[in-house]
């Protein structure tokens, strides 16, 4: 087989695996719906386990359904190198988010063993059971159990939209709640996750790889504005207590501040509800959300305070009562960048264009990064689209990611 033919086989291999895994939960619209502990989830994890068994990995599930494929190292005194991503999807999601990270890790480790034999440090490929929060109102169930951040109390009262309890779903999937105990793993030396970017920076800059330095922190607020409903035709503009106008001014004002003073910050209002929501009545009550993200805690905190001050100021000017509820407060996480520095030369030798970047989305690497050295890599996303059946990454870009991941894992484990 020529070098060109071998390269074509490798490119086809990762694409075929992505397409294969997408068949578990594939929808008629071309997307994937694979929710935690659903039949599709169970089938996908079982199929992945079988594939890893067939290629020489020692496999096992933990108590919550994280699947591990283990290649034992020659020096067991060293910690485990853990690599992978999450198996669950959003409803009607794409086939690359999460899944690519698992399959790229599987292929990278498989090829390293075929070429170099057993590693010095034990490597485990993980298919994390949950990250998205699409079925139950919690996220990172897989990774947070590995680092000991969750307990049985976390899920005690949780139910999905169908009224099925978390405990029931867990048991039906083969992981009885009665056997679940929190146990933090202390043998992991390093976690590395490769993922599609879910943004357009790499594609627009015509880059092959993104080396992630930080994962942004997030603050999410719900703002309630209570004004006064009244007749749209008879109430003078100067006498109105219009909650919707107040909300609009706040959203517009914060957007302008972010663009002018905080170019790396993201602020979004994705949900808004006005009451009574009638065409000819002034809105007396408005609820809306603010999603604020940045990779520096100081900047995140400063903008959040600016937002609260502006909201109170605008509400006071219109005689509106305001209530602000901060319900998500996640700190930014700096990732381990030592490997980036060491492997820049290898990337250059391969002719790969890369950049150091910040992740604006949350990932399992964010959870691990608070407890142990963690590395994250991105490959491009077509048009920056994700969480959609239109999610797409070119096959050759998927293969580049596998190749780069192999270099990183070689440095860590060999």
Image (cartoon, rainbow, N blue to C red):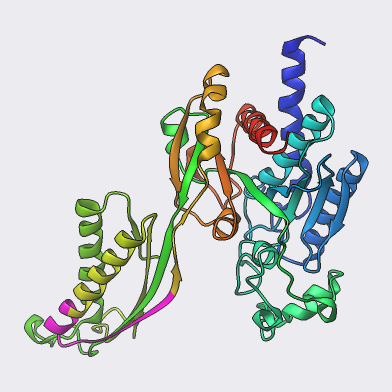
Residue drawn 9% across the image and 81% down it: 237
307 drawn magenta? no
Where are the magenta residues, as a range? 313-327
Residue drawn 48% across the image and 39% down it: 383
Residue 228 coordinates in the image, percent (x, y): 22, 90
Q: Residue furthest front?
A: 77
The image quarter in which residue 217 lies: bottom left
326 drawn magenta? yes
Q: Is residue 301 left or right of residue 148?
A: left
The image quarter in which residue 224 lies: bottom left
Foreground residue, 305 or 346?
A: 346
Is residue 263 in view? yes
Residue drawn 84% across the image and 81% down it: 178
Residue 352 coordinates in the image, percent (x, y): 53, 23
Vertical placement of 105 versus 166: above or below?
above
Residue 231 coordinates in the image, percent (x, y): 20, 88
Q: Is residue 65 left or right of residue 292?
A: right
Q: Is residue 393 left or right of residue 180?
A: left
Vertical placement of 235 versus 26: above or below?
below
The image quarter in which residue 109 lies: top right
**Quadrant (top left, top right, bottom left, bottom right) of the C terminus:** top right
**Quadrant (top left, top right, bottom left, bottom right) of the N terminus:** top right
State the count of labels: 0
């Amino acid at each position: 087989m020529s070098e060109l033919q071998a390269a074509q086989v490798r490119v086809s291999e990762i694409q075929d695996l992505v397409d294969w895994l997408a068949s578990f939960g594939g929808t008629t619209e071309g997307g994937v719906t694979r929710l935690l502990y659903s039949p599709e989830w169970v089938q996908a994890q079982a199929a992945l386990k079988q594939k890893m068994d067939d290629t020489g990995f020692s496999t096992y599930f933990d108590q919550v359904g994280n699947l591990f494929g283990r290649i034992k190292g020659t020096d067991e005194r060293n910690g485990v190198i853990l690599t992978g991503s999450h198996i669950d999807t959003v409803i009607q999601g794409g086939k690359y988010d999460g899944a690519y990270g698992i399959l790229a890790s599987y292929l990278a480790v498989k090829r390293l063993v075929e070429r170099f034999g057993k590693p010095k440090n034990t490597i485990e490929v993980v298919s994390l059971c949950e990250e998205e929060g699409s079925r139950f109102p919690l996220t990172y169930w897989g990774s947070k159990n590995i680092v000991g951040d969750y307990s049985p109390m976390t899920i005690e009262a949780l139910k999905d939209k169908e009224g099925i309890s978390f405990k029931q779903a867990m048991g039906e999937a083969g992981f009885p709640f009665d056997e679940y105990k929190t146990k933090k793993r202390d043998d992991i030396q390093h976690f590395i996750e490769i993922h599609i970017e879910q943004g357009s920076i790499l594609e627009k800059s015509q880059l092959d790889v993104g080396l992630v330095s930080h994962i942004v922190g997030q603050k999410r607020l719900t703002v309630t504005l209570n004004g006064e409903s009244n007749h749209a035709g008879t109430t003078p503009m100067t006498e109105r207590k219009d909650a919707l106008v107040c909300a609009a001014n706040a959203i517009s004002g914060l957007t302008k501040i972010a663009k002018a003073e905080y170019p790396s910050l993201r602020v979004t209002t994705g949900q808004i509800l006005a009451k009574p929501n009638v065409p000819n009545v002034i809105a007396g009550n408005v609820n809306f959300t603010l999603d604020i993200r940045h990779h520096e805690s100081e900047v995140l905190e400063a903008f959040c305070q600016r937002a609260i001050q502006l909201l109170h100021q605008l509400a006071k000017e219109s005689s509106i009562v305001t209530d602000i509820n901060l319900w998500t407060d996640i700190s930014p996480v700096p990732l381990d960048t030592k490997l980036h520095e060491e492997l820049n030369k290898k990337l250059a030798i391969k002719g790969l264009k890369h950049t150091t970047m910040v992740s604006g989305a949350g990932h399992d690497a964010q959870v691990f990064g608070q407890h142990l050295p963690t590395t994250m890599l991105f490959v491009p996303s077509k048009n920056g689209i994700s969480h959609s059946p239109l999610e797409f990454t070119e096959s050759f870009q998927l293969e580049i990611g596998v190749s780069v991941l192999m270099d990183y894992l070689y440095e860590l484990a060999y």
